Amino acid sequence: MTPHLSPDVAERIESVTHAGRRADALSLIEILREITGLEPTLWKGIIGFGEYHYRYASGHSGTAPAAGFAPRATASVIYLPDGIDTYATELAGLGPHKTGVGCLYISHLDRIDLPVLEDILARSFAAVTAGTFTQRAREGSGS
């Protein structure tokens, strides 16, 4: 079992077959622990830190991790609930990555600029936990 993790989070990490992705997951846990001051919990395969509540214009609402990632076969998927567009300038200097509406895909954590990633993660976490953010990435803040 991976030390200092709840059994379900440790099991999720141990299930990652790609050794590099597993090492990246452990590094991301340490980075997000430092940023959030929280321990990780498992949210349907996503390793999450904290939570925030959202409500769509349609009235649908829910709760999601305020910061989180999922180690996948081809990349670590880092979730930015306040949207990728919010960090366009920073992402230009991050290093090799791909993006989706609210997802940042990183294949090799050791090939990116970690201080840039840490800044993005800290700002995103602060934005969604400030008590004023109620959207999801697809509704976008983009500003």
Image (spheres, rainbow, N blue to C red):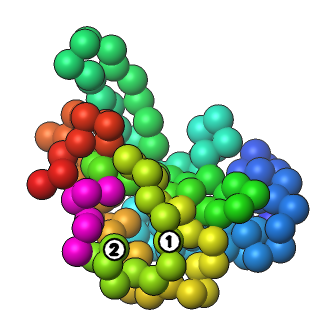
Is 88 magenta? The answer is yes
* Identity, as a three-letter code, of the amino acid under mark 2: Leu
* Image quadrant occupied by the N terminus: bottom right
Q: Give the residues in magenta.
A: 84-89
- Label 1 crowd (10 A; few <14 / some 14-19 / many >=20): some
Q: Is residue 30 left or right of residue 11?
A: left
Q: Are marks 1 and 2 in contact (CB under 8 Å)?
A: yes
Task: Tell me the SS state at disc 1.
Answer: loop
How far is the residue under mark 1 from the one under mark 2?
8 Å
Is 135 above or below relative to 85? above
Judge whether 122 appears above or below 48 on screen.
below
The image position of residue 138, as x and y in percent, is 32, 37
Q: Position of residue 59 (x, y in %)?
A: 25, 12
At 38% across and 53% down in the image, what residue appears? 80
- Is 120 left or right of 20, judged from the image as shown? left
x and y percent of residue 52 in the render? 34, 38
The answer to whether any part of residue 10 appears in the image is no
Query: For mark 2, what is the residue?
Result: 91
